Amino acid sequence: MGKTISFTSKQHSWLFFTSSILVSFGVLIVTIGGSWDITNHLLNRPETFFSPPHAILYIGVAIALASTVIKFFSWKNFQNDIKSQHAKQVKLTILGIAILVGAGPFDFFWHSNFGLDGLLSPPHLFLISGMILCSTASMTSIVRHSNKKLSTNSYTPFHFLIIIGLLAVLLSTSGLFYSFSLPFSDTEHFNFNPDPMFAIAFTTIAFPFLFASILYLSSSFVNGKFGIASLVGTLFLIINASTSIAQNSFLIPTLGFYFLGVIPIIIFDAMLSNSKRKLQYIAGAIPGICFYFFYFPLITHTYNEVFSHQIVWPSMTALIYFEMLESVFPLVVVPAALAGILGTIFASKISQKLRLI
Amino acid sequence: MKKLFLYCAIAVSLMAYFSLTLFVMPPNFLEKPKLTPQPTLDVTLDKSKINLGQSFEIKITSKNIGDLADIQIVSIQFPNLAEIGNTVKITEYDFTQSPYYVLVGDEVGAEYTAGQKIVTAKYPSIEAFSRPINTGDQYHIGLQVTPESVGEFVIYVKSVILPHYTDLAHYPQSGILDYQGEYVKAYSVEVSNP
């Protein structure tokens, strides 16, 4: 009887961990669909709600929803002390998935009544908020659940599974930041476009902060083991290249330039693995400065509003981006470096808090 | 010693990265895409003379015989009309985007600038468009026109590919200029009393 209870408890523990990974995976699929959808709007101007990127997006929602249900029932069967340890994350995941699922009909209602919406609209803000809640709560569950296994000296599957959780947070938060910075929200009925000056200030601070934070967390969660931060950063580049660059045939020649971004990511990872904490913080300036390259091509539209004022045709995106490089880069390098450093300090505090509990 | 080597490698790699991304690679992308898209139009009218109350049909096939581009617009204008109303009906349409009806007084782009120069529409038109537009892509629009007055019923047709790099990116390349300062080809049907 005792053996049966022990086995069931392990099973629930395994289910809880797997479902947390799958919630993050679902959100990751949503972010991939969302990113593809933005590019699709730029290239093809789809006129219907029923498009392939929307299908991908809602498959991701379905995965996240089903996984949340499993996560909830496995959590309910935990012993009380473990149950209370994960209670907040489970509640946040449920709240996140409720918002995420509710955003679907809300989005359809919005499309039906106001035509195609822009990037920033009430249903999209709902969707992204749900994604961030779900992904953050799931990542926390994953880290807390596998804390001891992540601390070992050798690589385990947990080291690689945590990448899904981190990527989901990185991409969903990037989506939120894009909403408040890209000028894609001026539609027939509403103009939710951000003020161009606010948009460039926000982009220059928020994206470096986020990217440096997530890379720092990727390294910190695995005790500074080299490789995981590099994988998180490289997978981000691969996803962005697949959804935003490769879809636009005019941008394919820029792929070589874009993937050079792997170099500063690996350097940052190496510094996190081999340096003392203060130097690690300073190293946050590296991914901070490189945000202008990591977030190509979409940030072209943000900076164009102030620096270039051209129509950013898909065929002209690379030209406008590189034309602005020499005027934008010197202006953003210092604030972006500082934002990167602040991001690592912030991530260090978060990491300590998560791993100590 | 190991750390010194690591920091040297980091410094060299960072210098290489920023040299490549800031100085070496950008010049390769700083030229306008040397693309020369070229639209053509094949326009056929099934009748040249009709009686008032009868209809005629226009069939238009657009093609891009040049390089790929972002967008191709085919504009069909009706200089005799104040509004399209029931006079013109779309009978066939396979462009990738829904047709757009330009009303008198609407603000529209001019002189092939994709909206950077704006004029006010003096007569109604229907704009059919596809995006992106690859080499060899063909699209069709068919219209049924039932004029409501006797006389010559005139139709202007043109196609523009955007962004507009060269004179090859519009069709026709000479002839009548419309209110947008863009070349059009004119077609007409004689409408008589029965």
Image (spheres, coloured by chain):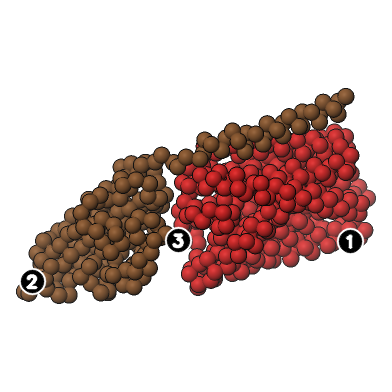
Chain colours: A red, B brown
Q: Which callout, 3 or 1, points at the residue further toward the start of the chain?
A: 3
- Disc on res. A84: 1
User: Where is residue B174 shown, x and y percent of the image?
Assistant: 22, 51
Residue type marked 1: Ser
Task: Output the chain of dot 2.
Answer: B
Give the residue displayed 35% in from the left and 66% down from the top: B119
Q: Using the rendered image, report if marks 2 and 3 lie on a common chain.
A: no
Of tags 3 and 1, which is closer to the observer? 3
Q: From the viewer's perspective, is B147 left or right of A172?
A: left
Q: From the viewer's perspective, is B168 left or right of A281?
A: left
Q: From the viewer's perspective, is A149 left or right of A265?
A: right
Quarter of the image where one finds residue B80: bottom left
Give the residue displayed 77% in from the left and 63% down from the top: A92
Quarter of the image where one finds residue B158: bottom left
Quarter of the image where one finds residue A303: bottom right
Label 3 crowd bin: few (<14), some (14–19), many (20+), radius 10 Å: some
Q: Is mark 2 on a helix, strand or loop?
A: strand
What residue is shown with label 2?
B192
Label 1 crowd bin: few (<14), some (14–19), many (20+), radius 10 Å: few
- Disc on res. A47: 3
